[in-house]
């Protein structure tokens, strides 16, 4: 169990930090290259991370590089490419964009079950990505997840998606709204007749592929979720406290059946109205670090030409040895 924070120069350096934490926690490194990291642990599953360091202009590009991609898989083959590993999620993955270094800070949270990363790209602007296995609801093969923060930038335009915290053109970890972005993130759930079944965090219901629905970014216009009522009633108007809610994930098997897959360990959603980015909440013996999904703002829309994720945040429990 570990928590680490520091600075990193770019996505390749960040990948090296993740590799170092994984080794320290007892993960097995299957492929070790400067821009590619394949690793696994029996408690978490198999994953491949790919860093793409080339840089695009955030003013003119919808989803600018540098990227970090994460694929889930069910095994490792030294002769296979990063996206064709055994049981790979393949064309479905978590992708984090606009990771232009050097970074103001990074925060790594890890156990044998998961590794979670928060990057403060520049002061006040964040990105999140995760991989590991859910605390599963029930006994089924799977539970592995891979996420990213794929935000639509193109900051040359005023009054558009970049400043809209609820735009379906964004994809964030455990999302409930993404529809037009790529790299939404995935979770695996197998049932009889379906193996290596990866559901993408995607706000549709299709008979041709599986999807996953999470609680992030659910607000007043998404009444199908009980998280809507949680969100609208936090923070408490009497004592100003913002309770932390688990990131429960639903899995919709090809439009046929819906399952409660589980929730990632030591991760919660939080309303940031009364919290500053990076603030710590102490609950009993536990410390929770709270960060915006992207950049904190007071409403759905932020200033023109700037990214804005409103008051939506993620809280991470410091799990120390």
Image (cartoon, helix red, strand yellow):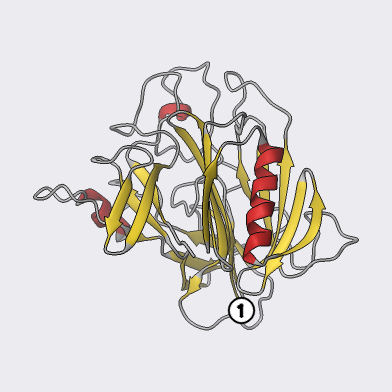
Of 263 and 229, which appears nearest the observer?
Answer: 263
Residue at figure coordinates x 28%, y 46% from the top left: 220
Residue 145 higher or lower than 311, as above or below: below
Residue 178 seen: yes
**Rendered location of residue 305, percent (x, y):** 45, 19
Q: Is residue 33 left or right of residue 162?
A: right
Residue 306 higher or lower than 138, as above or below: above
Residue identifier under label 1: 141
Numbered disc 1: secondary structure:
loop
**Rendered location of residue 64, percent (x, y):** 63, 29
Residue at figure coordinates x 43%, y 62% from the top left: 266
Residue at figure coordinates x 53%, y 16% from the top left: 156
**Rendered location of residue 285, percent (x, y):** 31, 64
Q: Is residue 90 left or right of residue 249?
A: right
Counting labels gives 1
Residue 67 higher or lower than 262, as above or below: above
Residue at figure coordinates x 70%, y 66% from the top left: 40
Q: Residues within 10 Å of mark 1 (few under 14, many from 20)?
A: some
Q: Residue furthest right?
A: 79
Query: In the rendered image, which quarter is residue 313 located in?
Result: top left
Of 62 and 72, which appears nearest the observer?
Answer: 72
Of 221 and 185, which appears nearest the observer?
Answer: 185
Q: Residue furthest left?
A: 238
**Rendered location of residue 136, percent (x, y):** 49, 75
Q: Is residue 204 left or right of residue 31?
A: left
Residue 93 seen: no
């Amino acid at each position: 169990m570990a928590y680490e924070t520091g600075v990193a120069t770019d996505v390749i350096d960040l990948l090296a930090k993740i590799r170092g934490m994984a080794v320290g926690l007892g993960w097995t490194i299957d492929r070790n290259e400067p821009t590619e990291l394949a690793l696994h642990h029996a408690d978490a599953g198999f994953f491949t991370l790919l860093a793409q360091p080339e840089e695009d202009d955030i003013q003119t590009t919808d989803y600018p590089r540098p990227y970090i991609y994460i694929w889930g898989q069910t095994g490792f083959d030294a002769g296979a490419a990063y996206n064709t590993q055994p049981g790979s999620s393949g064309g479905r993955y978590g992708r984090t964009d606009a990771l232009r270094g050097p970074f103001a800070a990074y925060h790594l949270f890890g156990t044998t079950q998961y590794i979670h990363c928060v990057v403060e790209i520049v002061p006040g602007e964040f990105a999140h990505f995760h991989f590991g296995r859910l605390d599963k609801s029930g006994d089924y093969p799977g539970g592995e997840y891979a996420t990213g923060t794929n935000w639509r930038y193109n900051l040359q335009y005023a009054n558009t998606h970049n400043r809209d915290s609820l735009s379906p053109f964004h994809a964030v970890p455990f999302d409930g709204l993404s529809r037009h972005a790529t790299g939404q993130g995935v979770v695996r759930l197998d049932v009889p007749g379906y193996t290596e079944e990866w559901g993408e965090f995607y706000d549709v219901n299709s008979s041709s592929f599986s999807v996953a629905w999470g609680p992030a970014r659910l607000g007043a216009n998404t009444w199908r979720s009980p998280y809507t009522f949680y969100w609208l009633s936090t923070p408490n108007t009497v004592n100003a406290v913002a309770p932390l809610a688990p990131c429960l994930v639903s899995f919709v098997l090809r439009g046929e059946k819906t399952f409660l897959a589980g929730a990632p360990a030591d991760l919660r959603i939080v309303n940031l109205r009364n919290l500053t980015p990076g603030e710590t909440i102490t609950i009993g013996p536990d410390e929770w670090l709270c960060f915006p999904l992207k950049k904190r703002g007071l409403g759905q829309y932020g200033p023109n030409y700037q990214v804005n994720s409103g008051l939506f945040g993620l809280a991470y429990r410091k799990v120390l040895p």
